[in-house]
Image (cartoon, grey):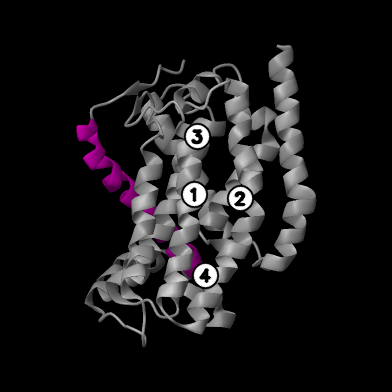
Amino acid sequence: MTEPIVQVSPAWAVLAPLALLLFALAGASLNGALIARSVGRPFRSGASAPLAEVARLLRQRRQVTVAADVLLWRIGAGGLVVVAILKILVIPLGPWTLADLDVGVVWFNTMDVMIWALFWLIGWGANSAHALIGGYRFLSLAVSYELPLMFALITPAVAARSLRVGDVVAAQHDLWFVIWMPVAFVIFCGSVIAFSSWGPFATGAGRDIAGGFLADVSGVDRLLLLTGRYAVLTAGAAFAVPLFLGGGDGALLPDWLWTIVKTALVLAVFVAIRHRAPTIRPDRFAEVAWIIVLPAALLQVLVVAIIVVGS
């Protein structure tokens, strides 16, 4: 049985970034291992590659382009980690949460919108054509998925009749939302991958534009940016647990451990998708998003609303 969600002391907030970064490192290690396996190298060498990359970037000298807006550039690179930490404040770990907000679902979505600005700042601040094109590519994708994402986030809230994350978890006591809201779950997961600029939605960092918003970022700035992408991906995976997967609900294990296990599994799927799905062109995705995905999200909300009103 799922325990009631309670808000813990703010002193525990110092552990939240550490837990987030450990998950992000695990995701990076899995990605490195999958890359190593694909080229025939030992699995272990790929898993340790992120640590070697961290050491390399910490020693690397920062590159600065001509007439770059350094302040905006560095706000964009470092801001992703901050946004990811703000996201996890409302995500319960079993029965504990750092911020039991009445509008926790809206809080998470608000942080998503901040990511728009951060990726654009990375592209704009470099004063480089490739980086700017990468930033605009990210925005073009975001325009297509953000509205379906909002309806996907609202769907569990409609079923729980509350925007509080704890109430959403409690409403799944008898049946996890992923079972009767599969469309919203898929849209949410796809949007998490997209706002992390990951896998099929990583056109903003495409090789055809020399790495896009990654083209001119080096040293500590590049380390913060890459860490931020993994951290945002991890925060999205963690939020799928209370939203669709019953929170800490599960047999034998304590609630907090179930939350960690579910988050790890969802994150592993997100990382693996990068190696299985082709890159999506923003213009093609716009057609699919507005003609198919958005109506499907609206239909999902309508079905859930009818069931809730009729129950």
Give the residue type that dot 4 points to: Gly
Helix or strand or loop: what does disc 1 sit on? helix
Which residue is at a point 44% across and 52% down the rendered structure image?
232
Residue 37 to residue 164: above or below: below
Q: Earlier in the sequence, mark 4 or mark 2?
A: 4
Disc 2: which residue: 146
Q: CA distance from mark 3 to mark 2?
A: 14 Å
Three-letter amino acid code of the residue under disc 3: Val
Q: Residues within 10 Å of mark 2 (few under 14, many from 20)?
A: many
The answer to whether the residue labelled 3 contacts the one labelled 1, judged by CB atoms less than 8 Å apart, is: no
Residues at marks 1 and 2, CA–CA distance in whole angstroms? 9 Å
Q: Which mark is residue 135?
A: 4
Identify the element where label 2 is drawn.
Answer: helix
Gap between marks 4 and 2 measured at Cα? 16 Å
Q: Is residue 17 magenta?
A: yes
Q: Which residues are magenta?
A: 10-35
Q: Indicate the quadrant where residue 256 lies.
A: top left
Label 3, on which residue? 105
> Would you say the residues marked 1 and 2 are in contact, meaning their CB atoms lie under 8 Å apart?
yes
